[in-house]
Image (tube, rainbow, N blue to C red):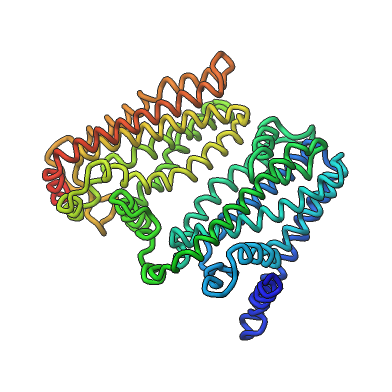
Amino acid sequence: MVAHVVRLRLAAAFNPLVRSWRGRVRAMLVLLAVIVGTGFASWGALSLAAAPAETARVAIVCAGSILAGGFFIAPFASSRADPVDPAAFALLPVSPWQVAASTVIGGVFGLPVLAVVCFDIACALAGIAHGAPPPAATAGAVMHVITCVLAARLGYALAVRVRLGGRSREGGALGVLLGLAIVVPATAYAFSTSWHAGAPALALAVADALAFSPLGAASAAMSGADPIVPILLAAVTVLLASLAWWLTVRRVFATQPEGRVQQEAGLGWLALMPRTAAGAIGARGILYWATDVRYLANIAIIPVAGLLPVVPLVIAGVPPETAALIPLPIIAGFLGWVAHNDLAYDSEALWMHLVSGVRGVSDRAGRLVPVVLVAIPMLSVTIALTAAFASAWDYLPALTGVALALFLSGLGLSSISSAAAPYAVARPGDSPFRQPQRVSARGAIAPGVVLFATFAVAMPTILFAFSTVAGSGGSNAGTLLLGAATGIVVLVGGVLIGAIVFDRRGHRLVEVGRAA
């Protein structure tokens, strides 16, 4: 059974080489890119043998964790079917445990896993140079490879479960957003921090946290002189992942394959989101935010508004490190504020919610989904760049607390405003800078009230963060907890109050869309 699956896996890997000349060219280019990338990564890992021990440990643990997480996430952004799908063996006279074991072993014979094997060998050699016992480093490398293979198996199974197989565009968009939220901050930290005297405190803290997680335990066993605990954690991770994969294969054998995946392949975000009223509204909101120039204009203006005050402050003599702290609260506040009139942009489409009996909570929560998807990478990048230019990486929790307080509070207050005080806006297809005439001052008062209230609610967090950065009191953990608590309370309260207003004023809200 194992030999048969391995032959199938190798045949699938070499299949592009027997197709057309275009397929052979693409396959050769991919192979060349993987070889070059693996060579550079392995050379970099080997060079860690000459780096300080702490720096080598941080690099090995973080790189190994990223690889393991990438194997789990990659199936969600890929349109390719599972190369060793256990459902293909469901009608054959084989047992689930045979298929589970065979697919894991067959998964090793893939180009990405072979690249990981080369990289792990280099990391193990670097770890041995810094005092890691050779048996422990070898065991860590083996368990890291197995962890990556199992992560890919479970990732494919979950991707099929949530019906992502035919939606590479939506999965790719999520992958881009996630990549921006992780890669940009990590790059900014790596290039804005001095590594000559060893790994900084923040990098060590991140590596320590990852070393005790399923993603980084095996890598930690390769890099440390005390690998007992990481090896135990890695072994537990492999056992639990193996059990989860066996249960998954067993369930596949016990149920008939679903035939609705191909039929729903054209639903895009509607099939990706949960099948609830809030999920449908969130999916429709994502489509609007991605295609309507009115939404895009609002998002494009936010970074500009955050950077505008920096130039005059620097010209006036304010230290650049201090001026670099200004954009974060502005961008976070405006990101939460941008949904304050979301109902008006629906125009005549709002009546669908009313005639279908959509509850106010579902409407309020669903409309926040696209804002959150945009805000996560934008705030992540803004926080990282703020810490880089202000040399404030030690105060990263405080900066995060300020962003959470402003953004979440803004979302909560906007949920109330968009239902209680909507005002007419440009019609779909019109220029976003062409605003209609309004018979009342609501269009001028409501946005200002929401923005002022957002900063007023978050002001205690802002002052606490200022005291922390200035060294006159406060703490990173206290600022983060205060900001998160403030934002969550205002967000939940705002959604509930906005839902009540929506339920009571639904018939009057349609008039705003008609007046737009």
Above or below: residue 24 compared with residue 274: below
Residue 421 in sight: no
The residue sitting at 28% across, 39% down in the picture is 340
Which quadrant of the view contains residue 290?
Answer: bottom left
Q: Quadrant of residue 206?
A: top right
Q: Establish if 336 lies above or below 358.
A: above
Q: Is residue 416 left or right of residue 55?
A: left
The residue depicted at 50 percent of the width and 34 percent of the height is 310
Question: In the image, 226: left or right of 449?
Answer: right
Q: Nearer the viewer, residue 219 or 481?
A: 219
Q: Residue furthest top?
A: 472
Question: Which residue corresponds to the image point at 78% horizontal and 55% vertical from the top-left?
Answer: 42
Q: Quadrant of the N terminus?
A: bottom right
Horizontal side, residue 153 vs residue 506: left or right:
right
What x and y, as percent, mark residue 79?
Answer: 51, 67
Residue 456 position in % (x across, y down): 35, 23
Of residues 345 and 162, the one drawn nearer to the viewer in this rendering: 162
